[in-house]
């Protein structure tokens, strides 16, 4: 299980000038839904997010407005060929820009921006930690004596940290995504402050790892996957390969049956699982299991090793496996 915390400042960038695009959030949702990842959040994060969402959208609208130039044009160009055509294009650009701005404003009020929809789903799936009076007092004390994170007069970071120390994952590592310098080491900015890392280790009996962007987190965990749909497919493949019960196998088969375009590596992993995972092998003649793997084999028989096919047939097509010297050699 992967455990992840994302600071509010990272979430808010998706309303303005995020270095990552919304596909990273979609991957996050897929990973949570699959059970591969637990996202930890706090009441503080959710309230900070709602408070600052409007400010971030306003900044995005200001940036859009700056793209529209109302400056006049010099007299020396007004009689040149192409001038009128340029002015028509300029008016058209202004009209389209204004229309886009109005759409943003309307969707902001309706909470129907694409980012709104994805965030709503993500927060519903997250493990949210309640800010208790005890946590609030611990955060206040942390701020008063000058321990990181945060600074006097601003308790938000301290509240989030105390929430995680109090109720975050214990005995399991945590990935922490933030670009806030109050969390980053002064010596090595790609790492958490040593004070915080040591405190986490002593309190939660695990390690904590800093990532400054969601994209860098996914690049480390799933380096070959760029799209949420690809991540979903890989996680479903992993679920079938690692199934620990007949129910797990049937459930994974049901979700994989509607997918196509598996990579060669995924196909090899699935066929190997069919041969070696007893929770698949023992129900190889169940209709859904047999059909899924038989279609997979037939579509890829030209590139699979004959010995692998022979071992596969031993469980899925025993009548064929009993025929021919190749099958005998394989056993």
Image (cartoon, grey):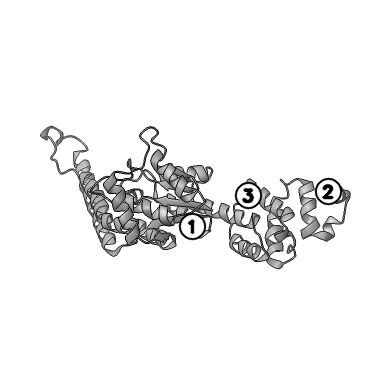
Front residue of 210/328: it is: 210
The residue indicated by pointer 1 is 32
Residue 193: give x, y in percent of width and height.
38, 39
Does 132 sit above or below residue 83?
Answer: below
Q: Quick one: label 3 or label 1, which is nearer the N terminus? A: 1
- In the rendered structure, the answer to whether residue 125 lies left or right of residue 93 reads right
Front residue of 285/246: it is: 246
Residue 239: give x, y in percent of width and height.
60, 57
The mark found on residue 330 in the picture is 2
Label 3: few (<14), some (14–19) or many (≥20) C-alpha neighbours in 10 Å? some
Q: Quick one: label 2 or label 3, which is nearer the N terminus? A: 3
Tell me which residue sits at (61%, 64%) in the image: 251
The mark found on residue 266 in the picture is 3
Tell me which residue sits at (34%, 55%) in the image: 45
Helix, strand or loop status at disc 1: helix
- In the rendered structure, the answer to whether residue 52 lies left or right of residue 278 reads left
Tell me which residue sits at (73%, 58%) in the image: 278
Label 1: few (<14), some (14–19) or many (≥20) C-alpha neighbours in 10 Å? some
Between marks 2 and 1 in the image, the one whose residue lies nearer the viewer: 1
In whole angstroms, how far apart are the C-alphas of marks 2 and 1? 41 Å
> For residue 277, which quarter of the picture?
bottom right
């Amino acid at each position: 299980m992967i455990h992840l915390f994302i600071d509010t400042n990272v979430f808010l960038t998706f309303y303005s000038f995020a270095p990552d695009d919304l596909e990273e959030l979609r991957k996050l949702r897929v990973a949570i839904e699959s059970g591969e990842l637990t996202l930890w959040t706090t009441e503080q994060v959710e309230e900070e997010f709602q408070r600052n969402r409007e400010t971030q959208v306003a900044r995005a609208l200001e940036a859009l407005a700056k793209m529209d130039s109302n400056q006049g044009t010099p007299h020396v160009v007004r009689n040149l060929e192409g001038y009128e055509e340029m002015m028509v294009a300029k008016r058209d650009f202004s009209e389209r820009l204004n229309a886009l701005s109005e759409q943003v404003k309307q969707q902001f009020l309706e909470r129907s921006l694409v980012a709104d929809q994805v965030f709503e789903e993500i927060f519903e799936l997250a493990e949210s930690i309640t800010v208790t009076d005890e946590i609030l007092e611990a955060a206040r004390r942390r701020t008063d004596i000058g321990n990181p994170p945060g600074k006097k007069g601003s308790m938000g970071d301290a509240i989030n940290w105390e929430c995680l120390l109090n109720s975050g994952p214990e005995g399991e590592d945590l990935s922490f995504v933030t670009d806030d310098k109050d969390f980053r080491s002064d010596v090595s900015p790609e790492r958490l402050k040593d004070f915080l890392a040591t405190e986490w280790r002593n309190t939660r009996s695990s390690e904590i790892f800093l990532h400054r962007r969601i994209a860098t987190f996914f690049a480390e965990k799933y380096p070959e996957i760029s799209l949420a749909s690809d991540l979903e497919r890989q996680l479903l493949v992993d679920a079938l390969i690692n199934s620990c019960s007949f129910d797990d196998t049937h459930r994974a088969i049901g979700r994989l049956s509607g997918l196509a375009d598996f990579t060669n590596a995924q196909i090899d992993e699935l066929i190997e699982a069919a041969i070696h995972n007893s929770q698949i092998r023992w129900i190889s003649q169940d209709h859904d299991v047999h059909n899924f793997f038989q279609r997979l084999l037939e579509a890829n028989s030209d590139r699979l090793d004959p010995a692998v096919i022979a071992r596969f047939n031993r469980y899925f097509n025993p009548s064929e496996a009993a025929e021919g010297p190749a099958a005998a050699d394989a056993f």
